[in-house]
Amino acid sequence: GHELAGVCVAVGKKVTRFAKGDHVGVGCFVDSCLECKNCMAGEEQYCEKGLVSTYGGENKYGRAGHGKGFESQQTYGGYSSQMVIHERFAFKVPKSYPLEMAGPLMCAAITMYDPLKFFGAKAGMRVGIAGLGGLGMMGVKLGKAIGCEVTVLSRTDAKRDYALKKLGADKYVAMGDADQVKKAAASLDLILDTVSANHDVTAYLPLLDVSGKVIVLGLCTEPHAVPQLPLIFKRQGIQGSVIGGIKNTQEVVDLCAEKKIYPEIKVVPVKEVNSIYEKLHKSNDAGIRYVLDVGKTLTEEAFTACANVPAPDVGANAVQVAKEAVGAVAHNYSKAVAIFAGGLALGFALSRRA
């Protein structure tokens, strides 16, 4: 529900960036204060007063409402048949780019592109991508498009052929193989760690050259124990990053269109969302982004199929997170079921309020 794409069906009278019929994308947030130093610098994702999430968010700045009669409700994001969004927080998707593939650019692609840009990735830089799920796959493709030498870091050799032959990575290191890790010592300048399961982030430090950095992107829940000596004697660092601002998101959308960079996706009907939720909870080894075809399949039948079955088996903690963060599917009214997946929504109205 936080990465979606559709067709603009109407615009407000003050809108200047979009027109009816444009292909439009929406990312992880739909509003921010627009006044703090981070918003003014184009890094709205770090809004000091807090951004408004695309789904499950509170319309605290008054620019993310659903219209008359829905003023106080939470945002629904891609889990709805239509959406109204301020033009500042929308992205223009070139019509040459497949609309069903555009949604993941607003999450997976920008999550990888923003740290690549911020930490100076350029032709010849040696970049490692740890984890080869939905984020890692886009990281490999974007790194190659920029001209980096890309090395995939994974637990075993199981994804070697996929990484090298299908995605075009230059090198591959199975982190569970001590010999491979030893041979790759000091071979990387930057590592983007996409692993969301609890793991030892310091295992990547021997692969970094002097002044190298590990950038953590996965949402791990357990703290890391970090030894200081490698950081001190090789001037290494461990930092974090989260999605990206409006300017950089539009940049990566345009880059993907220009270079024909596509995520690995599977379009599914809304009624399959519970089973997709369970698949994602178990693993996403294929790196697939599941896209809900909201425009064609968000129907009363889909609502019934989701509402009249047991909740997805994703564990107690994940269910609580889903209830707090995901929000709900909206079918033009307040019926809802808890779901989790990327969304494809056809039909947006763009607004720009004074």
Image (cartoon, helix red, strand yellow):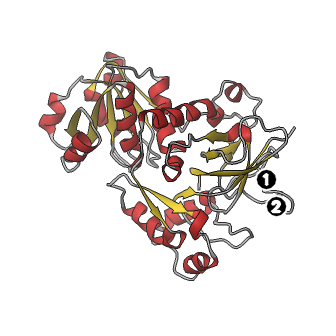
Q: Examine the rendered structure and indicate whether residue 120 appears above or below residue 91.
A: above
Q: Amino acid at mark 2?
A: Phe
Element marked by disc 1: loop
Q: Badge 2, how many Cα within 10 Å: few under 14, some, many 20+?
A: few
The residue sitting at 82% across, 58% down in the picture is 72
Q: Is residue 145 visible?
A: yes
Tell me the amino acid under the disc marked 1. Answer: Gly
Q: Position of residue 215 (x, y in %)?
A: 42, 32
The furthest residue to the bottom: 308
Q: Which of 233/350 is in front?
A: 350
Residue 152 location (% of width, % of height):
28, 37
User: Which residue does the numbered mark 1 point to in the structure image?
Assistant: 65
Q: Residue at x 47, y 40 (%)?
A: 109
Residue 218 in percent (x, y) is at 44, 44
Q: Is residue 179 above or below residue 25?
A: above
Q: Quadrant of residue 173?
A: top left
Give SS at disc 2. loop
Mark closer to the chain start, 2 or 1: 1
Asked whether disc 2 touches disc 1, contact meaning CB atoms under 8 Å apart, the reply is: yes
Evaluate whether residue 194 shows in this view.
no
Relative to 105, does residue 315 appear above or below in the rendering?
Answer: below
Which residue is the site of mark 2?
Answer: 70
The residue shown at (26%, 42%) is 163
Look at the picture and state if 227 lies above or below 280: above
Distance from disc 2 to disc 1, alpha carbons, whole Å, reads 7 Å
Quadrant assignment for the N terminus: bottom right
- Residue 339 is left or right of residue 74, and the answer is left
Q: Quadrant of residue 187?
A: top left
Location of the C terminus (image quadrant): top right
